[in-house]
Amino acid sequence: MAITFLHGVVLNCLYKINGERTIYSIYHLLNGKKSSQTIQDAKFYQISQYFKTFPKLSREHFDELITDLEREHLLLRTSQQSFLLTEDGLNYLKTFLAQHAFIHYLDGYQFQQDEVFWERLSLIVQVASNLRMEEIKYLPVQRNKDVQAWIKRFLVINNIKRTDLSKMLYDEMVRCLEGSQLVDPSLLVMRLTGFRNIGKTKRQAAELLGYEHSHYHYQFVSLLHFVMSEIHKNEKKYPLLHHLLLDLHEDVPLTDSARLTLKLINNGLLIEEIAKIRKLKLNTIQDHIVEIALQIQSFDISPYVSEELQKRIVLAVKKITSRQLKQIRQEIVDASYFEIRLVMAQLGDNI
Amino acid sequence: MSVDLLSFLQKKFNFSSFKQGQQEVITSVMNGQHTFALLPTGTGKSLCYQLPGYLLPGTVIIVSPLLSLMQDQVEQMQMNGEKRVIALNSFLQGADRREVFRRLDQFKFIFVSPEMLQLDYVIEKLQNLTISLFVVDEAHCISQWGYEFRPDYMRLGNIREQLGNPLTLALTATATEKIAEDIIKSLHLTSCEKYIYSVDRPNIAIKVEQVSSFYDKQERVVELVSTLEGPGIIYFSSKKLAEEVAYLLKVRGVSDIQAYHGGLDQESRMLIQQQFLNGQLDVICATSAFGMGINKENVRYVIHFHMPLQMESYLQEIGRGGRDGGKSIAILLYSPGDELLPYQLVENEVPNSSQVERLGYWLRQNSNNLQRMEEFEDEIIALAGFSETQWRLAKDFFISHRQKQLKYDEILQLFNDYVDQRMAVKKNHVYQMKKWLDCEDCRREKILNYFGEQRKIEVEDCCDLCGIDNSSFTKTTCKNKKGDESFYWKQYLSTILLNK
Ligand SMILES: [Zn+2]
């Protein structure tokens, strides 16, 4: 069993969580599970760039990855579901990160909607190409009805001449892709379909370019994130392409349930009242509040933790340089886990 | 009939002439006759309801058993510019569904799955329409003797009556005489015109090759693919083998080849189909999921790596060859013991006695939930250990018996009998297929006999037992290897977007 790129990703994540979370927190991260816990961990351990970057990963497959890493002596089991990197593991990871600089483009958390973006991009290219040749009989490469409807609306609203559309698309795509220093744009371009030119499947593209599947996948997704971020940052440079992103930007990515809790908080309700109204456990509402604090920098946590306690918790976190609640709790016995988590959420990456 | 069908065909569909049987079937429908039509695969069954649909006022309802096939047909029609077409099936959900039902009368062609027709409010909505034609596609699913029997098809006769006995067209590509009679009876068609065309496709040569082992079979496939004129399709019973053989062929230097099966994501499936249609791929290693929606005219060979589960599927699959009327060859590779696999597959399709027993246990515990059994899908599947096909078979059965308000032990008894009967029918189909493999005189004649026909014409390159001139099917063109395989992304973008 060869060590694949995905093995490297798992290794990197395990390194970051440092045995303080179970391996399955990584499984949920890669799958993009929308739970408060997963999102908080992603932020705390600075692995949010991997969020939802390998959706549809099965538990069996994930277990295999761990077994492989353990067999190769890159991981050492510390308890039932936690692992630490061995000396070999650390060395392997160092080389891995040095060799794959493109991982800098990857931002799974910010670009959770990358699949929709790709569906729109590939479909608009196909539509533009066929429009240019005045071909109306072709099967759309994307069958997602929402994406098809979106393209129709886009064309109607913008009312661009058919020859201009393909020219604009060409110019903007070249402008954008030329900026990619770390990933070869061929990776993405060969999967595009146009008039009488059918694009490659991801497997074909990986084979043609000689990449193992997950290595190809991560480069493709990284390039997609590069493109999305480039367009997002320079809307004016991409008068056409930035439309593809407009409604995909989630300002505050909250779970639906947390969003409702936030609404009730804004209406002036207390935690206990919200729990009662929503028939949920107090714990659950507290999880929501931690999630909200994590996402919204300006969220005021002082109704839930006194300013004085906040200061002491911050000091303790800095001193211990660990994310393990237990250790912090030992330091400040009068704080609840909820209060500690909340302060840590507010701190975010600023530790 | 005052309308000139031919000129309408040319104007609306851009075809220069009718294929065999189409004009007769369409004329019969236009004369207001209930019609049964058996048209062999590849002769354009769908034109038989599309063309009358445009000439008749009101709506055409098409009952179709397979969701994927239905989706393909709708997309094909949309691609050809028809906007007033819709599929009513379980994919249609929520707001979309409400919207569609609100303006149902604005659609000209409504495809509907048989399960949707079990719902009272769907029937009510359809009753409000002026139905000009009621089409039963894949009508052989109605018959218990058929390999694809669907219990929910049995109720179509009653549903027709609820809809006011609309003009009806029953279409199939495979039906023995017995099944044809069954179809007409089940649909309650008192007078019905029958148009039966031979299932024979004289331009397809039929060959069965014995090999002594699995290894030899693989080697033979490599040999065939490198010598036969393409494009070609190789059918497998398993995804895994389709992948493995595609890989083997690639390693052996066949470049334009790809595996296709239900395990691929939707985008990849779509791309592979289109690459094949577009001539970018020469060979497809496929499971039976491949080919239903696509119309590739120039397929020159179809190889079966495994024996199909019944003659009907075999005929349908080899029928994907030679649709342009040109010569095509079908080669089935058989090694001793191959028949064990289809028997095993059949057993995985039908619940076994211990599974039925466990289902019975669930029914006893949940006798008040009989009417909404599908809501407990996960629970039942886990308890009985059903495969996907086994569960579908059970679900279809229970849904179609819902209206009878039976007690759990009564319905369990019925289900027991049903399962035994399905198993017997399916095993018999495998047996018939094996018998055909072993036959010693003309294979084509035996196929015709199976469907109740006699052989009337002499066919050149008929079958391996009558003799085939292999040179008719060997590669003539030496494909020049593409020299430069490098990919330049800006060049490609410019090709597709600037046509330069
Ligand atoms: Zn013969």
Image: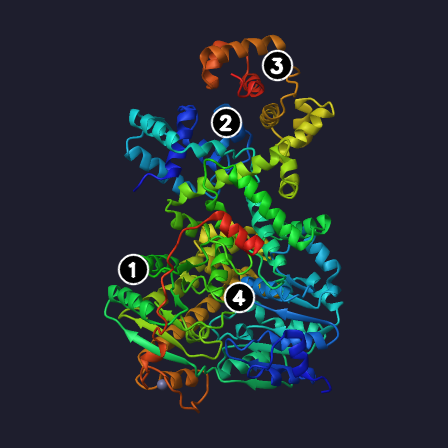
For disc 4, the neighbor class at 10 Å (few under 14, some 14 to 19, many from 20) is some
Q: Earlier in the sequence, mark 2 or mark 3?
A: 2
User: What separation in Å lies between label 2 and label 4 (alpha carbons)?
Assistant: 46 Å
Give the labeled residue for mark 4. B293
User: What separation in Å lies between label 3 and label 4 (alpha carbons)?
Assistant: 62 Å
For disc 2, the neighbor class at 10 Å (few under 14, some 14 to 19, many from 20) is some
Give the labeled residue for mark 1. B252
Are the residues under marks 3 and 1 on the same chain?
no
Location of residue A255 in the rendering, given as x and y in whole percent from the top left corner: 61, 34
Label 1 CB, ligand 1: below 8 Å? no
Left or right: A102, with B63 as reference point = left
Q: Which of marks 1 and 4 is nearer the N terminus?
A: 1
Give the labeled residue for mark 2. A41
Instruction: Report whether residue B44 is seen.
Output: yes
Are the residues under marks 2 and 1 on the same chain?
no
Question: Which residue is found at the position 55% from the left and 21% from the top?
Answer: A348
Location of residue B77 in the rendering, given as x and y in whole percent from the top left corner: 62, 66
Are the residues under marks 1 and 4 on the same chain?
yes
